[in-house]
Amino acid sequence: MDWQALSLSLQLASATALLLLPPSVWLARLLAWSAWRGRAALEAAILLPLVLPPTVLGYYLLLGLGGASPLGQAYQALTGRMLVFSFDGLLVASLIVNLPFAVQPMQRSFAAIPRELREAAWVSGLSRWQTLLRIELPLAWPGIAAALALSFAHTLGEFGVVLMVGGSLPGETRTIAIAIYDQAQAFNDAAAAGMSALLLALSFVAVILVSRLGRSLPRR
């Protein structure tokens, strides 16, 4: 077992799930309850990582985060390091790739909350912020928890984008999925099988969790 790669993967997955939470809640509410001209385009842009081949997405992220890009140049001016082939670059790529996995379950969860319930809260004197904290988030909690589980599990297993943006630098960008690939290439079947079994078990637990949470979503 490559414990260093496993630890890096767990750090990346935890940071991705937590950092995606605030923007995903905002986007999910926007898509669930608003109707405006650019809504379909925004929803399509969020869902794009689901259908793009990982190598294509990784290539564009490599260009967008590389040293010739404005973001890459700004990061290098601040830190003196390149954004690509670093943990920070890997995290930025992971946030983009996992956005649909975070937004979709939350969007379904917010859409299931009756509008009359929110209006009753406003009539009762609650502000929109209080309604969010005391009414909407507790009711949408199953979808939010499912989004966290999906984002975490998908980040653990992500391979193509991680390889394109991060490479395989031990202790910096070599995740457990890359370590499995390296061990398989080296014909170390025992190590590859052990790490694959661990990822399989984590993914199975995540699917069970998402399924259970999905059944507890509020119904209209």
Image (cartoon, helix red, strand yellow):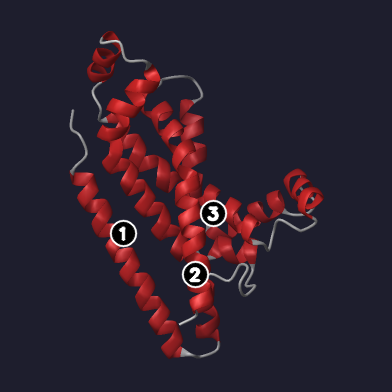
Number of other residues with Cα within 10 Å of mark 2, as a class: few under 14, some 14 to 19, many 20 or more = some
Residue type (three-letter) at the residue carrying disc 2: Ser
Of badges 1 and 2, nearer the viewer stands 2
Q: Estimate the spatial distance between the alpha carbons at disc 3 and disc 1, rounded to whole Å.
A: 18 Å
**Disc 3 designates what residue?**
94
Asked if residue 28 lies left or right of residue 66, the reply is left
Q: Secondary structure at mark 3?
A: helix
Residue type (three-letter) at the residue carrying disc 1: Ala
Picture disc at residue 7: 2
Q: Estimate the spatial distance between the alpha carbons at disc 1 and disc 2, rounded to whole Å.
A: 18 Å
Q: Residue at x 35, y 26 (%)?
A: 132
Q: Quadrant of residue 178?
A: bottom right
Q: Which is more N-terminal, label 2 or label 1?
A: 2
Q: Secondary structure at mark 2?
A: helix
Q: Residue at x 42, y 89 (%)?
A: 190
**Disc 1 designates what residue?**
206
Asked if residue 49 lies left or right of residue 112, the reply is right
User: From the viewer's perspective, is residue 205 above or below residue 74?
Assistant: below
